[in-house]
């Protein structure tokens, strides 16, 4: 880790951290407002207007047909769920393994989780035919004593996502309480009042720190299996069907690995943007990109392996339906997209083997975006290629997304950016107290290892 | 009654063997492919009986037509020894239906007649059932369909008109089955007699290739037919273990090698 210095050239002090991070909350430049206005406007124009039109006209506004009854809306849903995966999961795993490099980036990674989950939940509404009855999928008590169908993987999905959303919101909020308190003490006006509420009377006593640490670790342990289960369950929506090429046991690990893969790439993108736009060069360093690059490399290899297994099981099944689905996937109508996915997600990430690549930021940014484009293609292909070639040749068909669907995809990206932009002005986007833990006690030299925050007492 | 008693009662009711898989009737259709000429009269009859919409040219081109029963065409053999085969395909009313397990709101379920039913009012339109159905016989209402005047006058009052965002499929003309059961009850009979109820497609079939009846009754025409033609009987995609209620009788082809 490179030595951290403040603008005067002295080793970074606690006050510098507070100053830098709280400055990002209180001082808002023109560029921020322009970005926020653009993102919000795009959300309204590209997401909500087409969606309202679709609500009025019916799902015919999208390009879906028989047999392609599932389209990009579902692909978007899986994509956003997948993107949500890495944030909290990575943060939990690294917290439990005591990795110090996590501390500067985990807050924004968790925020990414939260907001992509919200966008994904919106896509459930966009996807279904009658979203005004979506609450019927929830097990609430009603006078008709009607319950949802507990055998349905879609219902497991609703449960899993609701649980994950709750868990990760509590996790990010609880980890931010000391930082809200720090912001409370250094802001004035309406911000001060907001942080008074958000910090819930945090005073920083030993007891409070002890309880926070305990609860934080407890939640971290709780969320790891939750995160793995959520995407396994999303995969069951597909794997529990009888559709050739979807009905495979590899799907749960396939989706989990794919989710963490695209999520980690998403973190790289978000960190690059945060670092540039908010002058966090001191806190988000090449070390972070280096470590995330190693993780991406490992995940890309796992992803490639699972893809090979998927092809192999399809071929080895020996049934004509599976063979047809396989042939269609590799050489059919969507073949170009398939090979693009292989290029972006399996071949290009092999560059990460070089340390120079991992520590150069712009190539990392480009690669991370390419990986997410490839992963989006993967989700689209899972839906589109499999439904196009099922058992009865009479019901074969093709599905091509309509303008409304493409617009809603763009709008969902804008919605994510809008939520994130609002987030960086409310939450300290770098965890102040955990960064301070890596810096050694005040008045001391900056410790290279940074593992001992303060001298041990007793 | 205390809560515990309630629980005990439900436990006794639900744990009785056969509660989940034995039904009052087992409505079955047999389709003799040797008799089927592919005239598509069944499709027309179904359209008239069940208020199927005319989706229009554009929607049809996009592959959004709604036809609860369709004549599937397929090619047999290689050119030049090639033949066109066809097979009527409708909801198979599987006893182990994949669509029923996946619906999150139980809009599709097995009723006491052993039919696979669709409750339009309960459907939220996840379309998962259409994906899970290996026969591709579930049709989604992508828009609300309208009937130009005076066509709305000929809508069947016994059948609902479905709105946008709702899945629909062949019901074995459940409205006719209900009426037959009501008549049987009024006459003081316990069961519907064989031949008393016929779906529209069966009633229309000019070559009488389609036979409908109760498989539980060994003397019914459909049971007799299946028993008699055992060597020709098969069910589509039987390897998937959906145990469909539609039995096809194979076409006897002298030229087949």
Image (tube, coloured by chain):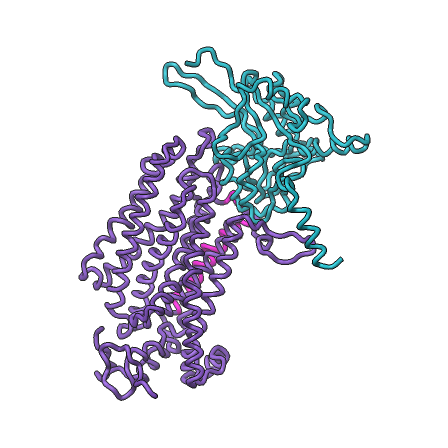
Q: Position of residue B214 (x, y in %)?
A: 66, 28
Placement of the N terminus of chain A among the 4 image quadrants: bottom left
Task: Report if residue A56 is visible in the image.
Answer: no
Report the span colored magenta: A33-61
Image quarter of residue B29: top right
Q: Quadrant of the C terminus of chain A?
A: bottom left
Q: Position of residue B119 (x, y in %)?
A: 63, 42
Query: Measured along the vertical axis of the image, is residue A202 above or below residue B126?
Result: below
Q: Give B227 or B175, whichever is nearer the viewer.
A: B227
Q: What residue is rendered at 21% in x and 74% in y?
A: A2
Tell me which corner region of the image, top left, top right, bottom left or bottom right, holds residue A387.
top left
Chain identifier, colour cyan: B
Residue B51 placement: quadrant: top right
Chain ID for purple: A
Residue A206, can we see it? yes
Magenta span: chief secondary structure: helix
């Amino acid at each position: 880790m490179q030595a951290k210095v403040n603008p005067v050239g002295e080793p970074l002090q606690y006050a510098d951290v507070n100053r830098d991070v709280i400055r990002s909350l209180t001082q808002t430049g023109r560029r921020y407002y322009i970005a926020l206005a653009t993102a919000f406007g795009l959300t309204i124009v590209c997401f909500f207007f087409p969606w309202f039109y679709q609500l009025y006209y019916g799902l015919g506004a999208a390009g879906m047909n028989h047999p392609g009854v599932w389209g990009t809306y579902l692909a978007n849903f899986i994509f956003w769920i997948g993107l949500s995966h890495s944030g909290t999961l990575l943060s939990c795993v690294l917290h439990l393994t005591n990795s110090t490099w996590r501390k500067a980036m985990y807050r924004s990674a968790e925020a990414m989780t939260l907001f992509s989950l919200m966008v994904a939940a919106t896509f459930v509404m966009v996807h279904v035919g009658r979203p005004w009855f979506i609450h019927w999928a929830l097990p609430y008590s009603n006078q008709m004593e009607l319950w949802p169908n507990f055998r349905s993987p879609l219902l497991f999905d609703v449960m899993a996502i609701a649980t994950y959303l709750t868990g990760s919101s509590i996790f990010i909020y609880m980890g931010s309480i000391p930082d809200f308190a720090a912001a409370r003490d250094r802001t004035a006006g309406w911000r001060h009042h907001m942080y008074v509420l958000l910090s819930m009377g945090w005073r920083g006593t030993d007891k409070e720190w002890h309880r926070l640490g305990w609860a934080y670790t407890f939640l971290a342990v709780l969320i790891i299996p939750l995160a793995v289960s959520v995407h396994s369950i999303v995969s069951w929506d597909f794997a529990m069907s009888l559709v050739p090429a979807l009905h495979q046991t590899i799907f749960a690990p396939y989706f989990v690995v794919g989710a963490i893969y695209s999520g980690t790439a998403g973190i790289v993108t978000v960190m690059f943007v945060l670092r540039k736009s908010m002058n966090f060069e001191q806190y988000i360093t090449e070390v972070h990109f280096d470590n995330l690059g190693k993780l991406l490399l490992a995940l890309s290899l796992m992803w490639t392996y699972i893809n090979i297994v998927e092809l192999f099981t399809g071929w080895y099944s020996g049934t004509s339906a599976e063979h047809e689905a396989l042939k269609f996937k590799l050489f059919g109508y969507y073949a170009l997209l398939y090979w693009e996915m292989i290029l972006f997600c399996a071949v290009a990430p092999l560059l990460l083997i070089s340390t120079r690549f991992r520590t150069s930021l712009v190539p990392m940014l480009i690669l991370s975006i390419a990986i997410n484009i490839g992963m989006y293609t993967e989700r689209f292909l899972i839906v589109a290629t499999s439904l196009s070639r099922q058992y009865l040749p009479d019901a074969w068909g093709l599905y091509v997304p309509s303008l409304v669907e493409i617009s809603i995809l763009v709008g969902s990206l804008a919605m994510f950016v809008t939520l994130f932009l609002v987030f960086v002005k409310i939450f300290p986007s770098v965890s102040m107290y955990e960064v301070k833990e890596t810096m050694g006690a005040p008045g001391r030299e900056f410790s290279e290892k940074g593992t001992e925050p303060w001298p041990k007492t007793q | 009654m205390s809560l515990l008693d309630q629980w005990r009662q439900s436990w006794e009711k639900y744990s009785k063997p056969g509660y989940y898989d034995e039904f009052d009737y087992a409505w079955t259709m047999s389709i003799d492919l040797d008799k089927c000429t592919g005239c598509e009269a069944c499709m027309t009859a179904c359209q008239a009986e069940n208020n199927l919409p005319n989706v229009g040219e554009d929607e049809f081109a996009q592959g959004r037509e709604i036809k609860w029963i369709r004549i599937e065409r397929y090619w047999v053999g290689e050119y030049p020894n090639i033949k066109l085969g066809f097979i009527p395909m409708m909801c198979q009313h599987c006893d182990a239906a994949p669509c029923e397990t996946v619906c999150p709101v139980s809009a599709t379920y097995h009723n006491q007649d052993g039919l696979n039913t669709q409750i339009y009012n309960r459907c939220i339109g996840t379309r998962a059932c259409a994906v899970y159905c290996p026969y591709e016989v579930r049709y989604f209402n992508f828009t609300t369909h309208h009937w130009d005047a005076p066509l709305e006058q000929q809508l069947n009052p016994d059948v609902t008109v479905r709105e946008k965002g709702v899945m629909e499929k062949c019901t074995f003309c459940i409205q006719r089955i209900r009426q037959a059961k009501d008549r049987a009850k009024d006459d003081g009979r316990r069961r519907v007699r064989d031949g008393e109820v016929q779906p529209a497609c069966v009633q229309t079939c000019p070559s009488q290739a389609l036979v409908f009846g109760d498989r539980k009754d060994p003397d019914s025409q459909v049971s007799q037919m299946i028993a008699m033609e055992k060597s020709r009987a098969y069910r589509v995609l039987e390897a998937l273990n959906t145990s469909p209620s539609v039995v096809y009788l194979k076409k006897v082809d002298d030229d087949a090698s």
